Amino acid sequence: MEGRTVTAEWQGRSIEAADPAPIAHASFVLSTPTIRRTEQAAAAVQRVDDRASGALEVTGRLLLRAEGLASSAIEGLRASAADVALAEAAGPDADGGNTAAWVADNLAVVTDALAARGAITTQRVLAWHERLMRHARDIDDSHVGAWRDGIGWVGGPNPLLAAHVGALPGAISSLMIDLVAFCARDDVDPVTQAAVAHAQFETIHPFADGNGRIGRIMIGVILTGRLDVVYPPPVSLEFARDVGGYQSGLTLYRHGNVDAWVAWFADAVVKAAERTIAVLEQVLRLEATWAEATSGLRADSAARRLLPLLPGHPVLSAETVRELLGVSGPAARAALDALADAGVVHEIERIARGAGRPRRWWVADDLLALVGR
């Protein structure tokens, strides 16, 4: 599978744009070590799902938050875990011009994409993009939820100096149809399929912005669907830890070295699975610390009942607690005060934008520290 380009014109000068070969029916010959690594990666993902059982269910959203934070950070969108969780909890009250709101949108798309299951289609990919880019300021409205209609590139101030120039606009639709057909295959092992689908998507570079984040969402959808697991490992964390290796791997793929890219990708999946186990163990230890810190409270108290829900709701308002536990407003506030007194959460100051919105928020700092501040 050789890397291909096509000559095009940009502002009166010639450029070389990607012209990726179709992959819907392609065969990929991998080396024996790479095949073994993909098998190990698939087994590692399934082992996490088997080992975690109920613990993964309550920690899954924390892991998705780690994935969303890392995927956004790769694109230069950085915000604290607490601010992102607050933007997510605030919902319509979140400040749309804030980077945290953009990252929260990434988390929302990841969550919805994984919950929906089913085949990847062009319609789903476009819908992901529309949701992802709703707070973006540097993209024209006509490019939100739509394939780009101009030259797209990665790295550098213009396509003449870019690290990569995506496929020409006229080829995007057919290339994406070909890509989703590849994603529907069941004769390619899941890890190789996720690796190739992601690299092909990034090579096409079909959107004016947000390509990396959408492409990494595809990884999670493929791995969870093909391996029949609830949550994918946070692969973006490994990409973010070795951005150079990630970008080099994509370049190798574009030049026809599929084996090297798949091997690197499989290694990242294994490391992400190992990281998932480590986070699960940290959460269990943290929950034990919380239990000890609140041992003086009644076992059936609202504060104690709230503890196992914190991994999925690390930022809370009294209104959120009231809805989660079905208690009164005063009881919800008392529960939060009790957890604050025990050092489980602490109150943060935020100004509400809408009338009637909760102005007091509490955050489980130690929990969010597990995915990065």
Image: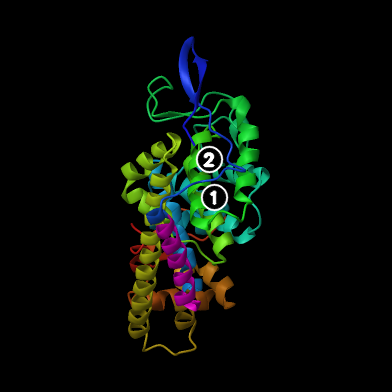
Residue 306: mark in rendering: none
**Quarter placement of the C terminus:** bottom left
Name the one closer to the observer, 85 or 122.
122
User: Please, what is the three-letter code of the amino acid marked with disc 2?
Assistant: Phe
Q: Residues within 10 Å of mark 2 (few under 14, many from 20)?
A: many
**Discs 2, 1 touching: Cβ within 8 Å:** yes
Query: Regarding mark 1 in the picture, which secondary structure is present there?
Result: helix
Residue 112 position within the rendered picture, expressed as x and y whole percent measured from the top left = 59, 56
- Picture residue at 56% right of the left edge, 25% below the top: 168
Q: Position of residue 49 (x, y in %)?
A: 49, 71
Q: Residue 167: say if magenta.
A: no
The quadrant where residue 235 appears: bottom left
Near-viewer residue (317 or 269):
269
The label on residue 201 is 2
Q: Tell me which segment is drawn in magenta.
A: 35-55
Q: Is residue 293 visible?
A: yes
Q: Position of residue 128 (x, y in %)?
A: 59, 46
Mark 1 = which residue?
A: 218
Residue at horizontal 46 percent and vertical 18 percent from the top: 15
